[in-house]
Amino acid sequence: MAEADGAEDRKPQSDEAHSAFTPPPGMEPEVSEEDQPTSEFARPAGADPVQPEPEGSAFAAPATYRAAQSPPAYTPGQGFPVVLLKESPWQDRMRTMLRMPVDIRPVPEPVQKLSETGPAVGRVLDLTLRIGELLLAGGEGAEDVEAAMFAVARSYGLDRCEPTVTFTMLSITHHPSLVGDPVSASRTVRRRGTDYNRLAAVFRLVDDISAHEIDVSLEEAYRRLAEIRRNRHPYPGWMLTASAGLLAGAASTLVGGGVLVFFAAVIGAILGDRLAWLCAGRGLPEFYQFVVAAMPPAAIGVALNMTGIDVKASAVITGGLFALLPGRALVAAVQDGLTGYYITASARLLEVMYLFIGIIMGVLVVLYVGLQFDASPRPEEVLQIQQRPLIQIAASMVLVFTFAILLQQERSTVWIVTLNGAVAWVTFGALHYAGGIPPVPSTAIAAGLVGLFGQLFSRYRFASALPYVTAAIGPLLPGSATYYGLLLIAENRLNEGLGSLVNAAAIALAIAIGVNLGSEASRLFMRIPGAASAAKRRAAKRTRGF
């Protein structure tokens, strides 16, 4: 019983007996209660601060540690470069933000559109997706769509947002904090159309939203977005049809056609355009619309050839091809691929391939029928283009002017893009016809000038570059090489025909790459955010494997 009592006395009476800060029994603290207690990390009194810690001490450095060989700190000694975002257009500011890792993005700029209760996350994300939908449906590149979405979200207080753009799907995720649940929203783009007037209006809306000196509330932004959706096209339907005919006529003159060929190409393109509209009204896919639209110009060209009139009948078909080749979609596809959006680029290239195959099928059907009726096309005359500099420059300007109307551009941009297209054709003619340079590099250089001037014009007016670029590449499209390849295939000269189609594809890619390269070269003439670190652009490391 006594042993049990002794054991009971040896047991700790409370958790306080286990504390490392409790003095042993019989030992009084040296410091009175009124004095300031010392830190538990302080050295004991009387210890030499210069003397190194003994081996094994918690304060001693490891034996293998050498200060000279220590790795550099995460933050460099000179600090991170200052990013002056307010001195550049919102496109460049947001593109710079997107290309930065999330952990080193600059602190958000002051937000003027933030309400007292904080941002309405759901409405801001919905507005962001609707704006991105209009831009993507209008043919804007994936990177520019993401930049616009990021600008809208940050302007309304959602700085921790990550937009994602694919060919038919838009999504955005907002992270309120490290511990809060993320909020995600998405939207599907089901209808795409060409209306650069609407595209320019959306860019003006995004510019006003991202400008700190202009207060645009959520209700005002929704109202303006609804007006943009309801806006009528700037040109009536009859003008679009007439523009399609004039475009084909100008293209036929560009490749050596005369007056009769000009009017024949105009009639063929107008008939093809009306048939395509009829098919669209019946709900047929765009592939069949291109098949039908390519048939009337080809039929008129074959008919002129069968009459025996001494005209360049092949120019009629070539002019019709100029009006149908999907240069806009090709440029957007290559631009997305070069900026790292490979899924969207693959989908756009697949769309271009389908449309191109539709044009081929429409022309080949007519050529086969013409051969059955003893038509005698002369493939050699397709590539024999007579050099008429003044007439060809005028024809190129008419081609670009009508192309801009078909794209529903603003009237203030039509004349600028017409001059840009004339510069492109003069450059191509000087390099190819006068200088003897092959067509592919000549086309790439001319397209590079188009991209350079188009990007500078767009930055000057704080707008999209597409209205200043797309129509200007019209005279450079490979209409002659495409028709030459189709004609050889129709005559069972398959190898030569495929070779000509490959040449046409190379010219088309040269146009797209030249436009993108010219746009990138424009950065040499503009102030961009983070100019001190421009040599270390984050986007260049996407595919290097580290």
Image (spheres, rainbow, N blue to C red):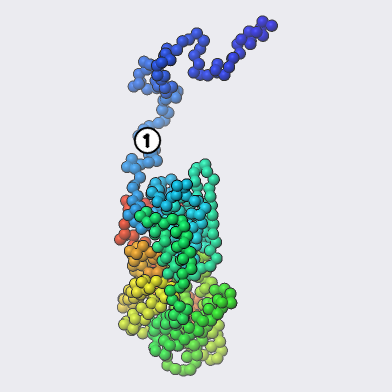
Label 1: how many Cα within 10 Å (few below 14, some 14–19, many 20+): few
What residue sits 59% from the left and 14% below the top? Answer: 13
Residue 122 location in percent, x, y? 52, 53
Q: Label 1 belongs to which residue?
A: 69
**Image quarter (top left, top right, bottom left or bottom right) of the N terminus:** top right
Q: Residue furthest right?
A: 1
Instruction: Decide: is 539 above or below 46.
Output: below
Q: Residue furthest top?
A: 2
Residue placed most toward the observer, 424 or 190: 190
Residue placed most toward the observer, 522 or 65: 522
What residue sits 36% from the left and 71% below the top? Answer: 413
Q: Residue furthest bottom?
A: 308
**Left or right, residue 175 beside residue 425:** right
Q: Is residue 308 visible?
A: yes
Amino acid carrying mark 1 in the image: Gln
Residue 544 location in percent, x, y? 44, 53
Residue 210 location in percent, x, y? 40, 56
**Left or right, residue 343 beside residue 81:** right
What residue sits 49% from the left and 51% below the top? Answer: 120
Residue 508 falls in which quadrant of the image? bottom left
Residue 201 falls in which quadrant of the image? bottom left
Mark 1: secondary structure: helix
Q: Is residue 516 visible?
A: no
